[in-house]
Amino acid sequence: MDWSGKTILITGASDGIGRDLVEQFDLLGVRKLILIGRNPTRLDQVASRCQSETRVEQVDLADSHQLTDLIERLATEEIDVLVNNAGVGLAGAFASHEDDDRLVSMIRLNCEAVILLTRAILPGMLERRRGSLLFVGSLAGWAGGPGLCAYSATKGFIHRFAEGLRWELHGSGVAVSLLAPGATRTSFFPSAGIDAMDIRTGSMSSKEVARQALKGLARGRAIIVPGIGNRMLLMLQGLVPRAFVGWTARRIFASILKPSRPEAQ
Ligand SMILES: NC(=O)c1ccc[n+]([C@@H]2O[C@H](COP(=O)([O-])OP(=O)(O)OC[C@H]3O[C@@H](n4cnc5c(N)ncnc54)[C@H](OP(=O)(O)O)[C@@H]3O)[C@@H](O)[C@H]2O)c1
């Protein structure tokens, strides 16, 4: 794929997987990178390391007014690749969540912002008969996550949305890919309320996830699962009875559940 001349918009560009995606796109020599996130200092730091032209937009995507204003400001941009990456998690036994605002904000960011941003940018791609949409789901989007129920549901939502769009846009010139990482070493876990110590074996670096994402995107892959261990886990999930997936998930996520479990009587 010839990346020169391409304009790429990345949400959640200030940290983690998004920041490393920016770096990877920059190395490919794209024309322009539009970086979206809330933290202006971190966004500026990421932008200052880029060779490509950058545009920084400080936006809270979970705030519908800020999202609407952003969409208006983007009207003049010809975006070739939209990377819907920004996302947060929320850990703990579901009944123990006391802050409804946090739950709603996660759903707005992980689902609503993705739908509305895609809705705004896709018509231009269809008119030009070219473009790529990259959605960041999760391995957790394929199975209910005990201790991460609402989060894994938002990712399942993204998986279905990306799949439907891919089939709907067949032959339109617009490609749709889903990136579904497994555990990746970023700020995601501490901000979701998960102790990094609880993420045991097999986590990947965000750099490697971003590298594999771009390789898959360039090849037009429908689903990109970085890491052989994660791909094997996904394959096994489809082969064993669902109850066994649940049994395993309970063990994997047991440490996440522990802090919020009511004391045994
Ligand atoms: N880490 C993992 O193990 C893992 C596994 C599977 C899937 N994922 C998915 O990968 C994506 C990236 O996560 P990550 O691991 O890179 O996490 P991260 O390091 O915490 O980065 C999250 C990014 O999203 C931005 N963001 C958060 N809330 C936002 C808001 N309300 N409005 C705008 N931007 C917001 C953050 O920037 P600001 O703070 O500047 O807003 C940051 O740039 C997420 O969709 C996550 O669900 C992660």
Image (cartoon, rainbow, N blue to C red):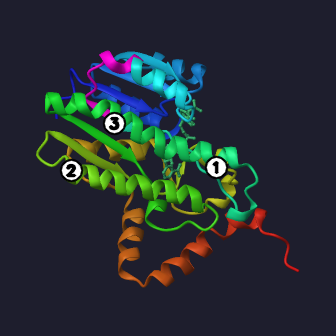
Kind of element beneath mark 1: helix
How far apart marks 3 and 1 lie (CA) works out to 23 Å
Mark drawn on residue 119: 3
How far apart marks 3 and 2 lie (CA) works out to 14 Å
Residue tagged by mark 1? 103
Circle 2: residue type: Glu
Q: Earlier in the sequence, mark 1 or mark 2?
A: 1
Q: Quadrant of residue 163?
A: bottom left
Q: Earlier in the sequence, mark 3 or mark 1?
A: 1
Circle 1: residue type: Leu
Circle 3: residue type: Arg
In the image, what residue occupies the spot 36% across and 33% down? 24
Kind of element beneath mark 2: helix
In the image, what residue occupies the spot 45% across and 60% down? 141
Q: Residues within 10 Å of mark 2 (few under 14, many from 20)?
A: few
Using the image, determine if residue 255 lies above or below residue 157.
below
Q: Earlier in the sequence, mark 3 or mark 2?
A: 3
Disc 1 under 8 Å from ligand 1? The reply is no
Residue tagged by mark 2? 168
Q: Residues within 10 Å of mark 3 (few under 14, many from 20)?
A: few
Q: Residues within 10 Å of mark 1 (few under 14, many from 20)?
A: some
In the image, what residue occupies the spot 24% across and 24% down? 6
| Residue 234 position in % (x across, y down) | 39, 68
Disc 3 under 8 Å from ligand 1? The reply is no
Q: Quadrant of residue 101?
A: top right
| Residue 209 position in % (x across, y down) | 41, 47
